[in-house]
Image (cartoon, rainbow, N blue to C red):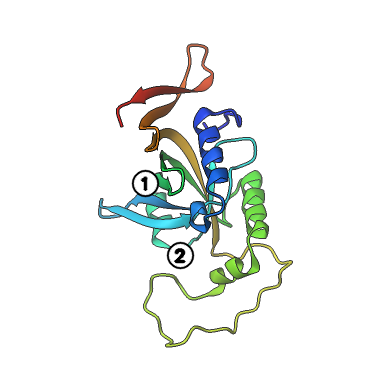
Amino acid sequence: MGTVSATTPWKQLLIRALESNSHLKHSSFFQLATVGSDGRPSNRTVVFRGFEENSDKIQINTDTRTRKVEELKQCPFAEICWYFTDSWEQFRINGRVDVIDGSNLDSVKLQLREKSWYDSSIKSRMQYLGPNPGLPCLNERPSNEFFLDPSSGPVAPFCLLIVDPEQVDYLNLKSNQRIMFTFTQNANGENCWNSVRINP
C-alpha cells in the first residue's frame, strides 16, 4: 500500500490545503487517534513531518516511551483528523501505522528514521533527551543539563511513525462537498484509489 504517486487525488487536495494555509503555524498540526490498551480511544496532537518520498505515506516523529507507541504496537491502526481553518477543509485519514525505532532490522526504514532525525531542529531533537513522557515530574524545574552533538545520529527514544492511508474522508465546508477516497486493487491487481461523493 501507499506506493501511489503524487497524483493521488486526496494527496493533491491535502497539498493544496497545506499551501493555502501555510501562513498559519497550526496548519502543520493534526490529531492522531489510536486505540488504547483498554479499548478506549486515545487522541493527541502531532506535527506533520512530510510524506515519505514518492508515496502518500505520512510521517510523524515521536518518542518510543510515549503511550501511543505502546498502543500502536498492540493495534497498528490509527486515524488522523486534520482541519484547516482558513480553507474550511477537513481530512480524516485512516490507515495502518509502521513504528520505526532503533531496533528495526530493515536498513531502508532505519535510513528514513535517520533522515527524519536530521530534518528536525536541534530544539526538537533535545526533547528526546528528557525524562520519560507521562511519568510524574521529579523536579520542580526542567533540567537544562542535556547536551546533544548536532552531528550525532538518532538517540534511542527517537521513533518515526509512518501512516499508510487506506481511507480518506475529505470535507470542504466552503463548497459543501464531501468525498470518500478508498484504497483498493483493480481487476488487474494494481493499487488504486476509488472516490465517491457522499453527503456532507
The answer to which image quadrant residue 102 occupies is bottom right
Which disc, if any, is residue 75?
1
Where disc 2 sits, the SS reads loop
x, y (%) of residue 10?
49, 32
Q: Residue furthest top?
A: 187
On screen, residue 147 versus residue 172, left or right, reads right
Circle 1 residues within 10 Å: few <14, some 14–19, many ≥20:
some
Classed neighbour count for the residue bearing mark 2: other residues with Cα under 10 Å, few (<14), some (14–19), many (≥20): some
In the rendered image of this protein, does residue 197 appear above or below residue 141?
Answer: above
Place residue 89 in its image quadrant. top left
Q: Earlier in the sequence, mark 2 or mark 1?
A: 2
Q: Residue at x 42, y 46 (%)?
A: 82
The amino acid marked with disc number 1 is Cys
87 relative position to 35: left or right: right
The residue that disc 2 covers is 65
Q: From mark 2 to mark 1, how far is it between C-alphas?
A: 16 Å
Q: Position of residue 146 (x, y in %)?
A: 60, 80
Residue at 63% across, 54% down: 116
Front residue of 97/167: it is 167
Pick the quarter of the image with the C terminus.
Answer: top left
Tell me: residue 126, above or below residue 7.
below
Left or right: 167 in relation to 113: left
What's under tag 2, amino acid-wise? Answer: Arg
Please state the horizontal and vertical placement of residue 111, each as a whole percent of the image: 67, 50
